[in-house]
Image (cartoon, rainbow, N blue to C red):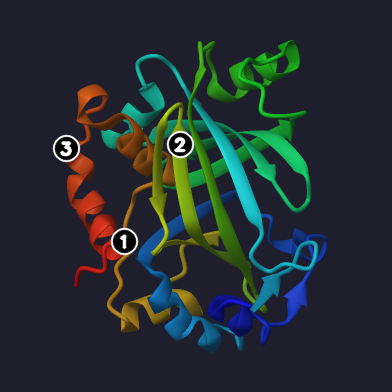
Amino acid sequence: MSKTENILHDFKPISLAEMDRVKLMNRTDTKFAFSVEKLTEFLGSLNQFYDVLEIANTRTPHYESLYFDDEQFSFFKDHHNGKTNRFKVRIRKYVESDVLFLEVKHKFKGRTDKKRIPANGFEETFNENQLQFLTKQLQSESQLMPTMWNSFQRITLINKTLNERLTFDFNINFHHQSIERNFSKLVIAELKQEDLDRNSPFYALMKNLQIRPYRLSKYCLGSIEIYGENQLKFNRFKKKLLLLKKIENDIN
């Protein structure tokens, strides 16, 4: 058992069904980044405020995603340019549950709205039902292609009293064709709330540890790592990317 799993053993487990009260398909998201070592330092202090999701006897389940964009990488560019109305499209597999969904995340004026429909597998082309779903959610017809695979493990904590969920993604991998990038020491945390509440125990903890919120999605991070400057412009992300690389390479 890893150090992280050993710490999680002290949390009260809850099931997927019990987590229904905090689905938060429409929410605000606040991201933070730090090392796996830092996570193990403070994780145990959170068990008085949060329960942990357990699926198929594991508290660190696996996720796999196939992301889509158009030939112009419009979704990436919208994020990079700070557009307040933007989308992400992916097929995600919840490995231990063995279920897949075609998901559209719509970011609009600081809120995230997620819609999804079941998928049979990681199809690289969409069937008629999926195309109708995408056209409705994206509010236009788009010619999308697979651009990147992503996998990671996730710890999901559910606040005992507040309507909020907290996730820690680690063992993060990106790959496409012959290119692969791994982030084995990086943790990306995401605080999901109905409305931003800085009184959250985790938000307060981050403030005490002087870990500031940051904005860079795994999709954008992976796209930069896979395609680089030859295909993508990411000037506005370079400072954030430098922070993540410092964490991954243990640079203070």
Q: Residue at x 54, y 61 (%)?
A: 193
Q: What residue type is disc 1 on?
A: Glu
10 Å crowding of disc 3: few (<14), some (14-19), many (20+): few
- Residue at 43 percent of width and 40 percent of height: 219
- Distance from label 3 to label 1 (Cα)? 20 Å
The relative height of residue 96 versus residue 193 in the rendered view (above or below) is above
Q: Nearer the viewer, mark 3 or mark 2?
A: 2
Q: Which residue is mark 1?
A: 248
User: Which label number is shown at residue 175?
Assistant: 2
Count how many numbered circles sit on residues in the image.
3
Residue 235 is labelled as 3
Looking at the image, residue 139 sits to the left or right of residue 100; the answer is: left
Q: Is residue 109 above or below residue 37?
A: above
For label 2, the SS is: strand
Q: Are marks 1 and 2 in contact (CB under 8 Å)?
A: no
Percent coordinates x, y for residue 31 in the rendering: 41, 59
